Amino acid sequence: MIRQFLILASLVFAANVHSAQAVEPLVDVAWVKDNHDNPSVVVLDLRTDREYRSVHIPGAVHAAYPYGGWRVVGRDRLFRLPTPQQFEKFVGKLGISNQSHVILVSRSETVSTTAVAAQAYWSFKVMGHDAVSILNGGMRAYFRDINSSRSRGTPSRPAQSFTAKFRPHLVANADHIRAMLERKRGTVIDFRTYGVFSGVNKEFRVDRYGTIPGAKHMSFAWLTVDAGGIIRKPEEIKRIFDYAGIMLNGPVIAFSDQSLLGALGWFAVSELLGHKDVRLYDSGFRDWALDADNPIERHFNPDKINIHNGSNK
């Protein structure tokens, strides 16, 4: 009996030590290789079915983003978060439990494909799962290492029980934006291109030009090295925000068109810079623009262009 008690106590202690260990938001290829045999680590490949079947990290499970369960489409044809119950079912079928340390792997050839991992990361955080990391550089970084082992086919893990604990404080909607505009407190950050932010261009399927009134602009492409797949170091990101004149005081709401790119902004501000009060506007500017009563600010005025010097006055 004493021996059984000691064994049980040691297992509980080990579990507590594991849970207490800090999970870094970014890991590198060396970390993934060193933890290949760790049963608590689940590598989750977010690429297309074809890419995954062709070659992947040994043991990696697969869920192509945004299909299968990452996002749901409403009557307004906008991608939104699934319900906690839908997420539980989706993640559990992948063999992920609440004790799993999930490593998210995207193509990471460009900043846009890197943002895929950031939005998947945010989804796990919203659903109460903190043991999640992004492989910085994704499969491109993994392939660069000629000593990295590779696999083919479609391996699977036994289904697991996953319980979501929804965190509403990480999610923004139009009501949060309106409240922030009314109180004039906090910072709304537009992570789309400057041309779209300023109103020179607009996104596909959006009928209105411009941005949310008072929003600051930060190009999503600045958050990765040379707009590629490597997410910058926190100190570099801090200098970039300082250069852009964006002070992270008080609550912050990040957004983009449907907030894929905004998720990368959320990740940079919340997880790398450590700002505690950051929400991501789920469905983003496309959702905001659908309501004609929501105000929009267009910095670019096509009717007041000086054709001689190109100024917009």
Image (cartoon, rainbow, N blue to C red):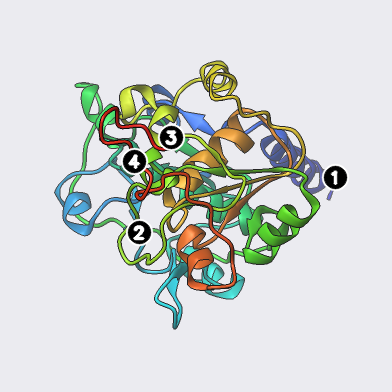
Chain-order first, disc 4 or disc 1: 1
Q: Residue at x 62, y 56 (%)?
A: 126
Q: Quadrant of the C terminus?
A: top left
The amino acid type of the residue labelled 4 equals Ile
Instruction: Where is residue 261? Give x, y as percent.
Output: 43, 46
Q: Earlier in the sequence, mark 4 or mark 2?
A: 2
Question: Is residue 222 toward the left or the right of residue 122 in the image?
Answer: left
Q: Is residue 42 left or right of residue 202?
A: right
- Asked if residue 92 can be seen in this view, the reply is no
- Residue position for label 1: 2
Q: Disc 3 to disc 4, how far (Cα)?
A: 24 Å
Please identify the quarter of the rendering in which residue 271 is found.
top right
Q: Tell me the SS state at disc 4.
A: loop
Q: Earlier in the sequence, mark 2 or mark 1?
A: 1
Label 3 CA crowd tier, 10 Å (few <14, some 14–19, many 20+): some
The three-letter amino acid code for the residue at tag 3 is Ser
- The CA distance from mark 1 to mark 3 is 61 Å
Q: Which residue is mark 2?
A: 63
Pointer 4 and pointer 1: residues touching (CB < 8 Å)? no
Give me the C-alpha separation between circle 4 and circle 1. 84 Å
* Residue placed under numbered mark 3 in the picture: 219
- Mark carried by residue 16: none
Q: Residue at x 50, y 20 (%)?
A: 233
**Is 270 above or below relative to 174?**
above
Residue occupied by mark 4: 305
Q: CA distance from mark 2 to mark 1?
A: 45 Å
Q: Is residue 16 left or right of residue 56?
A: right
Query: Marks 4 and 2, how far apart in space?
Result: 48 Å
